[in-house]
Image (spheres, grey):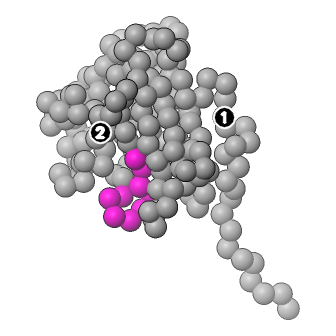
Amino acid sequence: MAGPTPSQTVGPYLAIGLPWPDGPDVVPPGTSGAFEVVGTVFDGNGQPVPDAMVETWQADPDGRFDHPDDPRGPVPGWRGFGRSATDDGGSYVIRTVLPGALPGQAPHLDVSVFSRGLLNRVVTRIYFPDHADAHAADPVLASVPEKRRGTLVAVPTEGGYRFDVHLQGPGETVFFDV
């Protein structure tokens, strides 16, 4: 009689098919106002995750999307999407510009993280300290307990911002059920 089948996760096979030529470049090189969002993805033990994928999606600097569902009309040519695999040290980089505010929301990046041990992506947001005055009016950020909101705000660095993702454990990043 055979024993039970060992528990296994699917993959990760993120390096197969998910990277794409423009990868972490939300905007073309040389775009005025461009900066980098850098960070590290950590597991529940505080160890870097060397095989995760971080995706971002955002509005353009005027708060609009190139999408037919944008009520103000699409913005042709604005991609607003970036994808970065983590390196051996769990680090990622996204090159972008500050998004504009959406109606009733503070400027932010939507973020999905795919990683080993996750059967589904986790979803979070990156808010910017430059727009702290808009944070209080943002209904999504306001729904997060005040003591945990800091896990959603990027830290300014030379040349951009830092946003680490903690999948579990102390300082766990707030994730949303979408």
Q: Residue at x 33, y 34 (%)?
A: 157
> In the drawing, does residue 53 fall left or right of residue 44?
right
Residue located 38% across and 65% down the image: 169
Residue farthest to the right? 1
Q: Could you say which disc has been placed on residue 144 in the image?
A: none
Give the CA separation, mark 2 to mark 1.
Answer: 26 Å
In the rendered image, residue 9, in percent from the top left (x then y), is placed at 66, 63
**Residue type, numbered disc 1:** Pro
Q: Position of residue 132 (x, y in %)?
A: 17, 33
Most extreme residue toward the top is 76
Horizontally, residue 44 falls left or right of residue 15, namely: left
Q: Which residues are magenta?
A: 164-172
Element carrying mark 1:
loop
Residue at the image point whose x is 42% and y is 49% from the top: 165
| Residue 178 seen from this side | no
For the residue marked with disc 2, what is the amino acid?
A: Val
Q: Is residue 127 magenta?
A: no
Q: Quadrant of the C terminus?
A: top left
Q: Tell which residue pokes out farthest to the front in this image.
A: 158
Q: Is residue 77 visible?
A: yes
Q: Is residue 43 above or below residue 16?
A: below
Query: Which of 100/75 is in front?
Result: 100
Query: Which x, y percent locates residue 24?
Result: 55, 29
Q: Nearer the viewer, mark 2 or mark 1?
A: 2
* Closest to the observer, 47 or 14: 47
Label of residue 155 in the image:
2
- Which quadrant of the figure contains the N terminus? bottom right
**Main secondary structure found in the magenta portion:** loop
Q: Position of residue 146 (x, y in %)?
A: 17, 51
